[in-house]
Amino acid sequence: MADVVLQCYKHRQTIMRKRLRIPHFIMHTALCLAFIHGPVLAQPTTSAEAQRIIDHVRVLASDSCQGRGPGSGGIEKAAAYVMEQFKSIGVRPAGRASFGDPFTMTTGVKLAEPNSVSFSVVIERPGVPVDQTRPITVGWKLGADYQPYGFSETGSAKGEVVFAGYGLSTSSYDDYSGVDVKGKVVILLRGLPGWADADQTLRQLATVRSKTTIARDKGAVAVIFVNKNGDSADVLSRFGLDRLGKYSGILALQARRSTCAKVFPPKGTSLFVAETDIEKTKKPRSFQLANVTANVAVALAFEESTTSNIIGMIEGTDPTLKNEYVVVGAHYDHIGMGDENSLAASNEPAIHHGADDNASGTAGIIELSRAVAASPLKRSVLFMAFSGEEKGLLGSKHWVTTPTVPLDKVTAMINLDMIGRLKDGKLNIQGVGTSSRWPAVIDSAKKGLPLTITTTADGFGPSDHSSFTGKGIPVLFFFTGLHGDYHRPSDTWDKVNAEGQVTVLSMVERAMRIIGDAPDRPEFAKGADKPASTQSSSMALKVTFGVVPDYSDDPQGLHITGVKPGSPAEKGGLQADDIITAMGQTTIKNIYDLMAALGSFKPGDTTTVKVIRDEKPLSLNVTFTGK
């Protein structure tokens, strides 16, 4: 499952791993199965289907697959295994090249040259004019004192230094009031002061990306983040790609608090005093650091790789309905040796096995294809193993943008992500609000099964079904819940509850057959294509816009894949495949910029939205409505 915000699970679990060396690129089924027999299972299986699930998961989550990071040899081995299983079952290739549906994506970011941070500091001495005092140079060490963010621009900047508190700017509280940051380097505190936690407007602006956008639009040339005072004050967050966009339009980095605090002049206000004043007075405490100039250089190199979705089909039996499709999907990629989404306690590379996330779902589509091959549906079924999910749902977005069958012939999408940890029979099903048919389908499919079902109406979320919701396709997302091994090396095959997964798949198969055999296709619920960004991130938003963002990177701005009918965006003339470059006074580079811009408007406001369409710039007027 794509990264989600977690505030718990602080423990670390040590695991032993045996490294397996594969002599050839292709993993044939017999060779793969040779990997999986040996130690006694931690959770014994009692059925052949459960044993097959464990067999699949144990291969996909093996050390040999190295966490299945897109672009790696490990994910190629996993892909070969899935294709071999499809072939043995009798699933027909339905990709662009046999089972494959290749696409190119950004898979990583590395530090290039030059990366440097230094400060020129003039320390005042009694009786000596400042302009006659020779400055001293304070240099920071990369990786020890500071680290660029993966969303930083590449370039260099020089400027005076301003401390701008928490970097917040609203009508009720503005850290930029009274200070000019144009052409300057800004130091900001991460998070919020304690008293601001209950303020929804400030909470919306509390993310690093939101603060970066505000600093950029205020004219800053670089932004340096430090942690609040506390036990984690000197901890640098993990370096890596930001899954919601790599283009921020400003140099951005993080620094250890103890290192950054030394830049503040000894005769001026210290970082600690300034932070304490904001906490006590609930007022901004921003100021320019006297006689301090910063030189910042950031160089990032992005890695591009080709990876592939795996697509197979079992044709339907009805002469007419076989031309319609039910998609059953699961992502088979994970986070490799531990990328920016890792929650491991250590930053050292380690295989993140991804047994539940999402070898379990991949095993599920293999076994469902076996069931459908034995007893086909009236409609055809497309089985899809997506790559690039952990980097922003890239594989599923690629497919819905360039589908291998007519998109209007896809009747529904069923997504399986993290279905291997069923506990106490609790199963969550999301996307129930995308079709009025779904409650009845769920009631029928769960009969007689030892499951306690909870549902979520929203068809958007951190997994591949979101890509289909945005295209007006009804979805159902099956999920057994988060756990302490999520995005950690300890998500291993032996912790999968295979018998529980058999129960989950029993319900999924029933739902799939109801959908696939029904005389009429399920209708898509009106309004269910409302973008996830405005549903999940709209704590303080007062307006509706109505676009479906494409979270993959575009150097020109924010690419959109759809526009909601009747929305302010549609009425203003925006179209699918437009690239939004500005909204009002805010430059738009990514979804964070869009959310920051929307937060400044109220119902009835009209603003200019600049887009690029067919490589030509356009200016459109949009009038916002209430939510």
Image: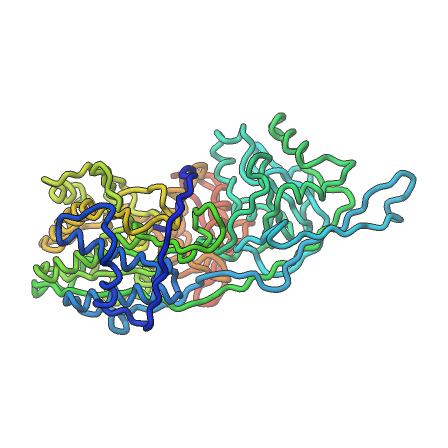
Q: Is residue 358 left or right of residue 305?
A: left
Q: Position of residue 397 (x, y in %)?
A: 34, 59
Give the residue drawn at x 55%, y 48%: 213
Residue, far right: 127
Which one is nearer the viewer's eye here, 68 or 101? Answer: 68
Q: Quadrant of the C terminus?
A: top left
Q: Position of residue 441 (x, y in %)?
A: 14, 45
Which one is nearer the viewer's eye here, 179 or 543? Answer: 179
Seen in the picture, residue 464 relative to 555 is either above or below; the reply is: above
Q: Is residue 164 left or right of residue 588?
A: right
Which one is nearer the viewer's eye here, 97 or 406? Answer: 97
Q: Is residue 541 left or right of residue 454?
A: right
Give the residue drawn at x 14%, y 67%: 90
Q: Is residue 474 visible?
A: no
Q: Position of residue 502 (x, y in %)?
A: 17, 48
Which one is nearer the viewer's eye here, 157 or 428? Answer: 428
